Image (tube, rainbow, N blue to C red):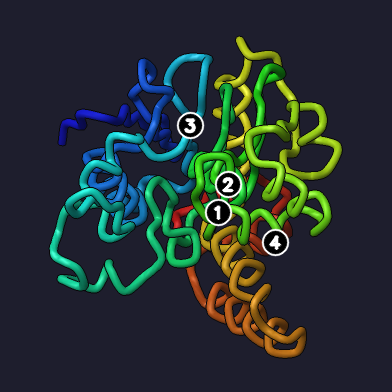
Amino acid sequence: MSWNTLIYEKRGHAACITLNRPDKGNAVSIEMMKELARLYREVEEDDEVWTLIVTGAGQKALCTGADMAVFELTKKGEHITGIDMWGEPMLANRRQWEVPQEATPPYMEMTKPIICAVNGIACGAGLDLVSTADVAIAADHATFFDPHVSIGVVSGREMVRMARVLPLPVAMRMAVMGKHEQLSAQRAYEIGLITEVVPKDSLMDRAWELAEIINRNAPLAVRGTRMAIRKGLSLPIQEAELLAESYRVRCAQTDDGAEGPTAFIEKRDPVWKGR
């Protein structure tokens, strides 16, 4: 399948989605939203893909948020209604009953780990790619901010998600300062928003390397661990531990669940099948 706003590449068991509107700061258009929704599903359903990388084209921006041209479709007469950005009748489908995701992977449903490689500016909806990634790294020139309140818009899911990743005072400061509070890559690393700062020319090499390292591990065990952590965050600790245990028991009954201990005993590298 060809993509108009994305670049899709696979290397072994790793894949990379690149937002490909560099002349627009990789801003999210309606077409990109629709293509991302389809491609995320394709990645999750592809048995050959074990780990996903998300990044932006060029070295200017990961994603600068929603394309402001999208707002033209939310006007009714002279008033901005703030309704469906896809230009569809209100409440016409299930998607409209959920929180708008724009560029966000379905990170609570996808089982496969997600690496975000921040290649420049990450702001607005671009922050979603960072806060919902399992591993986020950034080029040394990257910056992070949320401009919503500076353009008269409530920061909805973006800063709610950031407040789950960052200390509340840091997230709140970003939220209410708007475009006037911008974090450098080094500051983002210091507060735990990203896990590594990389020279910009080495960013993607490092992202692919991290994906390869993750893929040395048992893919089903990685997914079970990821889902236990993700879903467990919204549960009391005892229920979260029981959920994690249910994933552990199910993974133990797979071919890979048998291969791991066998390879350890035989002092050889395991051969993972993903089943």
Amino acid bearing label 1: Ser
Disc 1 packing (10 Å; few <14; some 14–19; many ≥20):
some
Q: Give the mark nearer the N terminus: 3 vs 4.
A: 3
Q: Give the mark nearer the N terminus: 1 vs 3.
A: 3
Amino acid bearing label 2: Val
Q: Give the mark nearer the N terminus: 4 vs 2.
A: 2
The residue mark sitting in front, 1 or 3, is 1
Q: Residue at x 68, y 73 (%)?
A: 233
- Which quadrant: the C terminus? bottom left
Contact? badges 2 and 1 (CB < 8 Å): yes
Q: Residue at x 29, y 37 (%)?
A: 29
Callout 1 secondary element: loop
Amino acid bearing label 4: Arg
Image disc number at residue 164? 4
Q: Which residue is mark 3?
A: 64
Disc 4 packing (10 Å; few <14; some 14–19; many ≥20):
few
The residue mark sitting in front, 3 or 4, is 3
Q: Give the mark nearer the N terminus: 3 vs 2.
A: 3
The total of numbered circles placed on residues is 4
The residue mark sitting in front, 2 or 1, is 2
Q: Which residue is mark 1?
A: 155
User: Marks 4 and 2, Cα distance to the nearest angstrom?
Assistant: 19 Å
Give residue 145's position: percent from left, percent from top. Answer: 64, 36
Position above or below: 24 against 234? above
Position above or below: 242 against 5? below
User: Marks 2 and 1, Cα distance to the nearest angstrom?
Assistant: 7 Å
87 with respect to 246 (left or right): left
Q: Which residue is mark 2?
A: 149
Give residue 270's position: percent from left, percent from top. Answer: 60, 50
For the residue pair 82 and 213, the one nearer the viewer reads as: 82
